[in-house]
Image (spheres, rainbow, N blue to C red):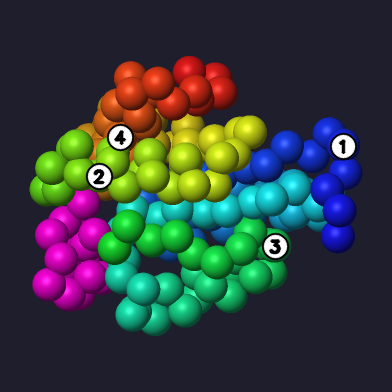
Amino acid sequence: MPRQRGAPSLLAVFAHPDDESISAGGVLARHATAHARTAVVTTTWAATTQRATELTEALRILGAGAPRMLGYADSRVPQSAPGSQRFLDAPLDEAIGQLVAHIREFRPEIVVFPVKFLCSALRGLRNYTSVALARSAAQARGMAMPGG
């Protein structure tokens, strides 16, 4: 389907699979319904897990394309990415580099980092804190972030 005028492309970044549905499912579905390109990046969980299968189905329903997973382990669930380091332990430059690569590849007009990340970062929830830091660093590398 051709993209309608006024339907900007959207890339959303979340810490975990299911955050996309809980935090921004309506936004993703609305953009997809308006024929906008939509995509989701999750920082934790591996593509070989059941959560990845569930994420794939959720994104299909929301019209948000295939999952883009950084594949780090969740801070509280080591089996989320067997053999991988936890997202909060990853070198910040590495995590930022992966995130920026997805942004540059997709070239969205809008990048969504839910406010939950910033609020959770203030409360010390570490996966969200790491995403908030990655967002700030991506901005510092010259990536334009709406609302930032």
**Distance from Cα at disc 1 to Cα at disc 3:** 18 Å
What label does residue 5 carry, if any? 1
What label does residue 95 carry, if any? 2
The disc, 1 or 3, on the residue closer to the chain's N-terminal end is: 1
The disc, 2 or 3, on the residue closer to the chain's N-terminal end is: 3
Instruction: Based on the picture, tell me whether residue 79 belongs to the magenta stretch.
Output: yes
> Is residue 146 or residue 27 the one in the foreground?
146
> For the magenta stretch, what is the residue range?
72-88
> Is residue 82 or residue 123 the one in the foreground?
82
**Distance from Cα at disc 4 to Cα at disc 3:** 26 Å
CB under 8 Å between discs 1 and 2: no
CB under 8 Å between discs 1 and 3: no
Name the chief secondary structure element in magenta: loop
The residue depicted at 50 percent of the width and 69 percent of the height is 55
The disc, 2 or 4, on the residue closer to the chain's N-terminal end is: 2
CB under 8 Å between discs 2 and 4: yes
Q: Residues within 10 Å of mark 2 (few under 14, many from 20)?
A: many
- Check the image and report above or below for 88 versus 59: above
Q: Residues within 10 Å of mark 4 (few under 14, many from 20)?
A: many
**Distance from Cα at disc 4 to Cα at disc 1:** 31 Å
Residue identifier under label 3:
63
Residue 101: % across, % down: 38, 45
Residue identifier under label 4:
134
What label does residue 139 carry, if any? none
The disc, 4 or 3, on the residue closer to the chain's N-terminal end is: 3
Residue located farthest toward the front when viewing the structure as drawn:
105
